[in-house]
Amino acid sequence: MEGAIWRRWYTGESTCGEFYLGSTQECVTLERPWMGGANTPDLAAIPEGRYRVQMYKSPSFGMWLPKLMDVPGRSDILMHAGNWAKDVKGCIALGMGHGVDYISGSQAACGIVIPKIRAAVDLANGLWITVKRVGE
């Protein structure tokens, strides 16, 4: 199955976008700021690209979370709850709505979307997510 994160809103503090499974928008996303393609772990959004997703038992969160695999120059890129860019350190937070540098309803979004991601990962060809900037 194919998924996508379409990055749409940018500030010096964060990058917000929309997460899709197939053609259905499931939630919004929040990442660290886009830094012109600079790949600075913990400070910048991950590079654009197409990444395979696996479920990963996170010792930090104590639960199974989606993990983007083989992100250049990065490791442990998870999709999890968070409301501010400081909550993600290179990962991707999921939410129900967004404002300037903030997403809301993150726990609720994770409760709805992560089981759908897990189901897609379990399909024969797995889940691949394309991360792309589509607005400025």
Image (tube, grey):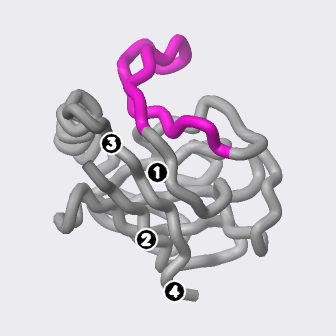
Q: Which residue is mark 4?
A: 135
Name above or below for residue 92 compared with residue 118.
below
Q: Position of residue 12 (x, y in %)?
A: 71, 73
**Amino acid type shown at disc 3:** Leu
Count every numbered label the image shows and give the total: 4
Identify the residue shown where x is 22% and y is 60%.
Answer: 22
Residue 112 occupies which quadrant of the picture?
top left
Q: CA separation, marks 2 and 4?
A: 8 Å
Picture residue at 47% right of the left edge, 20% below the top: 61
Q: The C terminus is located in which quarter?
A: bottom right
Q: Does 59 appear above or below 34?
A: above
Tell me which numbered mark, 3 or 1, is placed earlier along the sequence.
1
Does the magenta-highlighted stretch encompass residue 74? Answer: no
Mark 2 nearby-residue class (10 Å; few <14, some 14–19, many ≥20): many
- Kindly check if marks 3 and 2 are in contact, taking CB atoms under 8 A apart as contact: no
The amino acid at mark 1 is: Asn
SS at circle 4: loop
